[in-house]
Amino acid sequence: MADARIGNFVAAACVAAGLLLASDRPAAAQTGGGMVTIGAILPLSGLFSTLGPPERDAMQLGIEAINSGGGFDVAGVHHTLGIKVLDDESSAATVGISAYRQLVEVDRVPVLILADSTRIYAAQFRRAPLPVLNILDSTFPSILDIDKHVFLLRSDTPAYVPGGVWYLKNVLHKTRISFIGSAADPYSAGLETWMKKSATQYGLEVVSDVNYPPNTTNFAPFIQSAMAAKPDAIYLGGVTQEVLPVAKQLYQAGVRGIPVLHNAGATPTQAKQIIGDTLFNDVMLDSYDFAGSLPQTSTAPTTQAFFKQFQTRFNEYPDDLTMWAYDAPFVLVAAMQKAGSVTDRDAIYQAMLTMPVPPHTISGWIPTSDGKLFHDRDARTLAEGVRWCPKAQTIGAAFMFFMQGLDVTQQQVVQDGCGAS
Amino acid sequence: MLAQTLAEGIVLGSLFALLGVGLTLVFGVMDVPNFAQAGVITLSAYVMLWLRNRVGLPFWPAIGLGVLFAGVLSALTERFAYRYVRTRPLAAPAVALGLLLVLDNTALLLWGGDHVSLSTPYESALLRFGGVQVPAVSAVLVLTTAASLVVLQLFLHRTSVGRAIRAVSQNAEAAAILGIRPQTQYVTAFFVSGLLAGLAAFAYAPTYAVFPYMADAVLLNAFVVVILGGLGNVWGAVLGGLLLGIVETVGAVYVSAAYQTAFGFGLLLLMLVFRPTGLFTTGTRRVA
């Protein structure tokens, strides 16, 4: 009797575990007429939900700017731009695949914008190829290896991780790194790989390397392992929602005064929300965040205008991802104009390979020597390290750089990034 | 280092135990694997946040009302869902899963998918016991579990309501003949289980974050605890929770961090093979 009850209980638990991983939701309504509708799949809910909503909002701002400027002409025909955004619920393998089929095979969008988990869609790319513009997925091995139709509208992992390690060694004068990352997150795995390569190149020692399993919420054992190696710097792998809780628990475990370096691109809004309003300023004091260049610290007037517009409208700090997301519609419109078609996926793909930096973009794209936007399908900007400014409770520039392999070819250490803060 | 590891194992185990006791209480009384407990924890945490940040209540009143909300919500799940499948035990897991999805998605609909912190007045404090350091939020988790279990034990053994719950769990028909209304005890058991869920929300949320699926994964560990301890056995759930927490933590620190969860489920497999009734089998006596 007891065995049967246990059997039923275990079976029910297994079914629960399976069902918890799979759920679905209906798609939004489609637009039509003179409007060209592009597709996007974003994590609007779930683990990566700090990423999706601001990207959606920034893309919407970009589209509004295009349409309020009168739309665009392709091969003599006038169009306006629309976007259909579907939520993958941070579960690309289930919800995301359904969304892909909806947008690509049912709605027949000419181009698609993706954010994370691009590798999951590899079979779909082969089955129904179209130009895919990714605005987030900087992992290693690069997503550009998955399929020739994938373009990356941000600098890839090797473009910013080494700069952080270089900064640790040459500016903060640290030599012993403990890495804490997420075993289930390919972004974290890519950061770990390039952090180790960079440490070897620049003469730092990785004294501890721990990866916690999926769904971990108590990081104490991993923090203990990391600190037992007596590091003088901590490197955290993962996205904002993974990194900030670990940073908080590091602080709560008494780890203070040691630089905590990461590549989350966390905004002050996210820091306050995830860490909590009473603790975030103290936790972030030791934080150094190395990612793309930020609209907040940019001196370009158009970028500053975007920063103010986004902050005013959404009451949130725009990060590098939002800046790239804002530019994505401009890139796709320019590609369609160069291709002379709003429906021919292959022509648009060919146009993207050779297109120049489009007008009205704000990210500061650095073109190839022959003037193309994409360097082997990767659009690149300067990378930037930011530090925390406790008085203003915000981020300030610490290091601007550009990488060629593991060589820092451009560098500017910013001493007064916090100003009077 | 070993002492620190054991301390962290006790912290993790305390969370598992607190969750497991609520599950085992309901299972002991109604044979229901209450997956919806995770949804109750989540909504309770959101209510605490809402009372704190939107209504502007001080911390402790917000927590108290949040815990009470969890008890009421849990009782409502019995009244409007589980009651109708009490005599159909095979349907109970499906209802429980459906309820969990409804509760989690209610949180998603009302508050969105972002991770949000439930800040406490003590979250930067660090306690030191010799060479062992314990963050105050972790210490509060252990103390909450300990206090809850003592109160629960007193409630079940020293009050007429508690004794009635135990009587119904052992033999509902016999209890009814003696004048105890089983239906009342079912609702009461769910209410008490909900209060434990609310306390879990209060103790657990500040250690990580509040989000719509915050308790789903950890609740699966709690089910492991229930099986380890013996279905329906409160002290078995406590011991199972501590055992699971210590095994996972020691495994993560000394063997491999990436396989932390695997150590726990490995322990479960061993238990199912060698002692399938759990550490403390209750036989005919349940909610012991």
Image: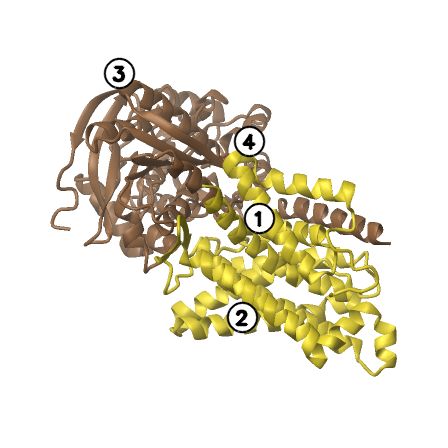
Chain colours: A brown, B yellow
Q: Determine the CA span between mark 1 and mark 2.
A: 24 Å
Q: Which residue is mark 4?
A: A120
> Sequence-wise, which precedes: disc 1 or disc 2?
2
Name which residue type carries label 3.
Asp
Q: Chain of mark 2?
A: B
Horizontal side of B258 relative to A159 (left or right) equals right
Residue for badge 1: B245
For marks 1 and 4, give the CA distance.
33 Å
**Pair 1/3: label in front:** 1
Q: Secondary structure at mark 3?
A: loop
Q: Which residue is mark 2?
A: B67
Look at the numbered disc 1 and give the secondary structure of its residue. helix
The crowd level at tag 2 (other Cα within 10 Å; few <14, some 14-19, many 20+) is many
Query: Foreground: A253 or A415?
Result: A253
Judged by depth in the image, the label closer to the viewer, 1 or 4, is: 1
* Callouts 3 and 4 on one subunit: yes
Does residue A147 lie above or below A386 as drawn?
A: above
Q: Is residue B288 visible?
A: yes
Residue B58: x and y, percent?
A: 39, 73
Q: Are marks 1 and 3 on the same chain?
A: no
